[in-house]
Amino acid sequence: MGTDIKAASERVQAVAAGNQRSARSRRLSDLSVGESARVLRLEGPRLFRRRLMELGLVPGTEVEVVNVAPLGDPIELEVRDCRLSIRRDEGEQILVSADKRGLKVLA
Amino acid sequence: MSTLVEVETGSHVYGTRPLVALAGNPNTGKSTLFNRWTGSQSRVGNYPGVTVDLMRGEARLADHDVVDIIDIPGTYSLLARSAEELLAVDHLLGLSGHRRPDVVVVCVDATNLLRNLYLVLQMQELALNVVVALTMVDELDDASLHLGELSARIGCPVVPVSVPRGRGLSELGEAVDRALASAEGSERFVWEPTDSLAADIAMVRKALPSAWPATRGLALWALMSWDDESETVPPGLRDTLAKTHVPGTEVDDEVIGARYAFLDRELGQLVAHPPDRTKTRAIDRVLIHPIYGFGVFVATMLVLFQALFAWADPAIALIEDFFAATAHVLAARLPESAWSELLVEGVIGGVGSVVVFLPQILMLFFMIGLMEDSGYMARVAYLMDRIMRALGLHGRAFVPMLSGFACAIPAIMATRTMERRRDRILTMMVVPLMTCSARLPVYTLLIAALFPATALLGVLPVQGLLMVAMYGFSVMMALASAFVLSKTVLPAPPTPLLLELPPYRLPRLRDVARMMWTRTRFFLTDAGGVILVCSLILWVLLSFPRTEPLSRDYDSAIEQAATAEQRSELAAERAGERLRSSYAGRLGHVLEPIVAPLGFDWKIGVGLIGAFAAREVFVATMGVVYSAGDDVDEESATLRERMRAARRADGRPVYTPLTGLSLMVFFALACQCMSTLAVVKRETNGFRWPLFLFAYMTLLAWVCSFLVYQGGRVLGFG
């Protein structure tokens, strides 16, 4: 059991490192509707990033942009089957993997 | 410092019965459950953050004893940053002298499961005795939830409920009863902190205030809740927190990451099918479409506007007629004395001035109730956020601002639809600048009396243009004020603003009606009292003293007058003389040096005092001041002529187009409305914001009128 977890976490780290190397990271706000990506890192002041993380945007999470308001802002996200809308400049603080297709997904 | 209003029902003393707290994310059906249990008056809405007040009630759960219930404002997390969040946490944890609840029922939205369960995990770390009420289950596939497994893995009872249909409520009551009988919840960490974080937690744990339970969970909570910038840190704890080793952001990463890792690993598999959102998506394809979306939005707002302006009007007229008729009947029956006048003019008039707001309040909250409970209000915010945010306002400020064109009173009450206190207050501070319908009679009188009924370039009527210009001016000033206030007095907090788009649901008339009644009741009992007292004070100012002998014996003159016309003229003259010698008349003289630079004389000063009851009263007050009778309206030819004929000491006319413009600008900007101030006091629960509102608007009005009048004179007008 213990070794399973250890092995699994090593695999996760290896894949994550590989993804980070190969992928140009970009901003969540750059994704268009229907695109999804994996959260890499959050920037901004502590309170701000903490609130986003508490809503589920922790590094490693897959996030999809499901809607953009007609005036371009805010954007609606789907995270873990949950919906939330954030403003575009908030999305700029969230770095995501460049391309989901380029991501090695764990089996 | 409690910034929320506590609402108590009944006369029962809290503390003798079991206490059940109701908590959960915003928009989880928490308020509906509270209403269902208590049968009382909390607000229900398909809308994040509707529970602004801390509501209390009592309920009989299952077949057992009566328990007290407290409805905690919706929150995504237990980390306390704002005053509202801190109050919620105080009540949940039993800090700051509040009683610790025996059981916490957490409403968990099954369609947003993991995010909601995050809050449950936090509560378990803090050893709360939790029962989960799983709401919105009817929007999920029956087969898609493994309830037993969910309960086992999250470590507390989980009861699916459908509050609107009344399903699962008795099971929930039984689960709460069982939890009440069981021991306190125990601390339950679902993850192990790293050594350095564990050391920090241990250090903070020793420094916790002695009144607090010295638990690991509470130590971690304190460690994450406060940093150097916080103001509310208990004494003694601040120094300890400064000595911790792990940087704040690393604590956040570790703790929040660990909680979500647990949720993903243990619970992520339990939801087989994500909720079916196809209907909501289909509706959204129209309602938040770049073209159709705005079309529907404009149409909805037109209906809202029409409802406030036109549909409420017959009811308003009926109320006004009723109170006028009552006063008339009473005046004829009662002996002539100051007390009779107090009853007829002061009390009946005062009550009338409160009740007259009800049609618009009910109408607005009916519309808002439908929009909120259907989920459309959230779409309005989504559509308008971009525009409103540029001015520092919340997307949801749009409906209150629009309602401000009808009347500031319901509009200010409508700011409750915003979750953050700062957004609410900022909106309240600018709504009174919108051109409300009470300003129209004032503008009509001044424009008709002082500006020619000619057309510019042969087609554009000067008077109509001026009216439009006043509307434009008020909107411009409201938006500019919002911008400036949001940069200075009310800066936006650094936390991201969440706009949830809940699934569309059919609004239930019962819930909407209950909300309308709740709002109306608060207005009548709280703001209504203040308005009544203020209108009595104003009445005294305008009617007393009565002792001085008048310049001639009007009573016998009226008796000897030959025609009815002469009699009413004499009565108007008597009323005019009385007002001129009243306290308000004297105050007008006191005000004169202050308003003289704006082009106003003391009679206008008296009018401004009278207008404080409601802006349109300016017209009637001017009618009395100029002895044209108190029943004049803005179309009165007599009043217009008397105003045109009024002269200053040096023989120049008082009313020139320039004075008129200056006066209109003053009315556009000054907070000449006691009811607005009374409602702001009630909604902000203090005198600070109504005083600020009055001060800033009056100053703004004075400066702008000064610029108009003095600038106009420099340019050679008037």
Image: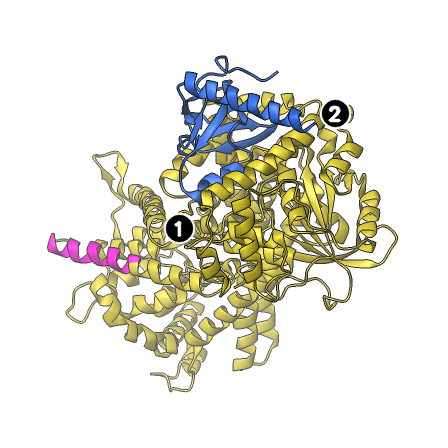
Cα distance, mark 2 to mark 1? Answer: 48 Å
Q: Where is residue B235 shown, x and y percent of the image?
A: 49, 65
Q: Residue at x 30, y 54 (%)?
A: B664
Q: Residue furthest top?
A: A101
**Is B704 part of what is drawn in magenta?**
yes
**Is B702 part of what is drawn in magenta?**
yes
Relative to B577, residue B683 above or below? above
Going by the numbered disc 1, the residue's amino acid type is Val
Q: Which of A2 and B482 lies nearest the eye of the viewer?
A: A2
- Res. B430 mark: 1
Query: Which chain gets the blue colouring?
Result: A
Judging by the rendered image, the residue that carries numbered circle 2 is B144
- Res. B76 mark: none
Asked where in the image residue A80 lies, by quadrant, the reply is top right
Task: Give me the chain letter of mark 1.
Answer: B
Rendering colour (chain B): yellow
Task: Give the magenta part as a residue range.
Answer: B700-715
Q: Is B543 placed left or right of B445 in the picture?
A: right
- Quick one: label 1, few (<14), some, or many (20+) residues within 10 Å? many
